[in-house]
Amino acid sequence: MTPASRTEHLPTAKTVEPGETLAGQYRRFVVRRVICLAALALACLVALLVDVASGPAMLGLMDVVHGLLNPHTLDAGTRVIIQDIRLPYALMAVVVGACLGLAGAEMQTVLNNPLASPYTLGVGAAATLGASLVIVFNLSLFGLAAHILLPLSAFVFAAAASLLILLLSKTLGASVHAVVLFGIALLFGINAIVGLIQFVADAESVQQIVFWTMGSLARASLDKVMIVAVVLAACLPFSLRNAWAMTLLRSGEEQARSLGIRVERMRLLVLLRVSLLTAAAMAFVGEIGFIGLVAPHIARLMLGEDHRFLLPGSALAGALLLSLSSIASKLLVPGVLLPVGIVTALVGIPLFIALIVGRSRRLAL
Amino acid sequence: MSLKLTNVTAGYRRHPVFCELSLPAIAPGSLVAVVGPNAVGKSTLLKSLAGVLPARGSIALGGRELDRQSPGERVRQIGYLPQPLPQAIPLVAYETVFSACRSARGDWNRRETERAIEAVFDTLGIRELALKRLSEMSGGQRQMVGLAQVLVRQTPLLLLDEPTSALDLHWQLNVLNAVRAATANDRAIALVASHDLNLALRFCDQVLVLSPGGRAELGEPEQVLTPGLLADTYGIEARIERCSRGHPIVLADNPLSAARQSR
């Protein structure tokens, strides 16, 4: 009996057409994914425009497009609303969401842990610690104003937390479990210190810290957007260059090692990238925890585990989630701009559940 | 290309699993079963040959020391199937195999890669799985995809750690036929770690028996797998009988008592 005639022993997929080359069928499969990625990008663009259009003074979508393309045609009031207020907020939501989505996807892959996110390793908590110190102790350094020192301090603390993890990972042999456990310990440790700082702080400082931990796009400006965008643009090519290696690592670490992939080195470089992305994102908007965890899962459900698609897909899913959250933060309570960090989970969870349920239904058919 | 091991020591950090292991040269085209009791070092041997675990001593393939080769050269020489199955993730079988080619066979153009993938799916009889996600497959199916990842690269040394552990009898035979085909015409040497002694007797040219205490014996299956060696290595009372077609089979009767083993 030939092997081909006995494939009934293994349950088979019905997607493969007999007589056609596998490469041809796979190409069609890839085209579907590219379309999916393009749809995600389009959804991000639409969400960005809606984000700019929405607010106390609602603008038409076409007016926003027209206003962005031809700013000189706008009256002064509308130009200020669009260009100086809403566009920076909306763009910040997109770039911060993309940074966190990408960071989460890379981290989940190299730590082989679906619960990993920039928060797992306490990087986000470290940013909060940096911000809290500036807020409570009213620090000033080299004559820097608080609005510059605060994000700087958040960035330095987040990066320091990552360096500490990198250092310990290297000395511990970069075992995945050691990194995750150390990250969780760091998270609890830093949260305890932040709690202690809040305990000794006055009421106004506590309020400011709490506001920081809720995450807000209201601190955005085009300069800050540019800084985050540059970090994202610098990290993304390195992430994509590793896409094949990361795909192999996800399918099995030993197999990846035997294929010449230097797993420890890759893990360290990814942690370094993640710390940069997270620190840059959170320095300007505060803590936004949900995106880094869920955006990669949404991308995985839509695009699968091939990192050529998963990495850009996670960045886009993160951007879309935060953009939708930004819209919701303006619309949930009319006239009030809610901190986006609160809204993120409220918007993200239904979307996430809808995707999981949809996928389960498709599989059950 | 022949394979020669001289004074090879490998293990985990400060705990060597085997020390100073030397073997006669293994000829190209050989299918070698690596057998022995649990924890004796079968997987460690394959991992050290694959470069996944560091090893001391000399491992030469075709007269060239493996540790003197660049990582790129080495992955073109060695195909290693680890014991853990590929993870159940939403990655389709085709791209699992494709990613292995992209990583290890940078010398192939796209057409050559596609042709090799087509051939390996046909040889293993898993064409229907090509566009199925690993997360939707059974353990046996994932093991077949893992094998495709290894065989597709057409390396002169195949190291397969229990490649049939999750497979039913039909697919076990299928895999062994595919491995036999890969070694045909002296194209490759295959080292297959297994607990199935009958598989070793039936399909392999040679068998390497690793015993506790670091002893190793390499030779033709019927000459090496004797009741005496099975008693010493596994602590069992066993017979080698012949089936109605004349093939030798191992029949394990009883575990030996500890007192008798120590004698």
Image (cartoon, coloured by chain):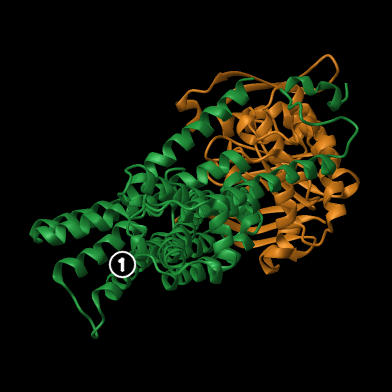
Chain colours: A green, B orange
How many numbered dots are placed on residues in this image? Answer: 1
Q: Nearer the viewer, residue B36 or A203?
A: A203
Q: Identify which residue is drawn at 87% across, 30% down.
A: A18
Q: From the viewer's perspective, is residue A192 above or below residue B146? A: below
The x and y percentages for residue A139 are: 18, 75
Residue under the point 52% across and 51% down: A60
Question: Between B239 and A356, which is closer to the camera in this rendering?
Answer: A356
Q: Position of residue B168 (x, y in %)?
A: 70, 22
The percent coordinates of residue A25 (x first, y second) are 81, 39
Picture layout, residue A244 above or below residue A365? below
Viewer can see residue B21: no
Residue at numbered disc 1: A154
Q: Secondary structure at mark 1?
A: helix
Label 1 chain ID: A
Q: Residue at x 81, y 44 (%)?
A: B117
Q: Is residue B7 visible?
A: yes
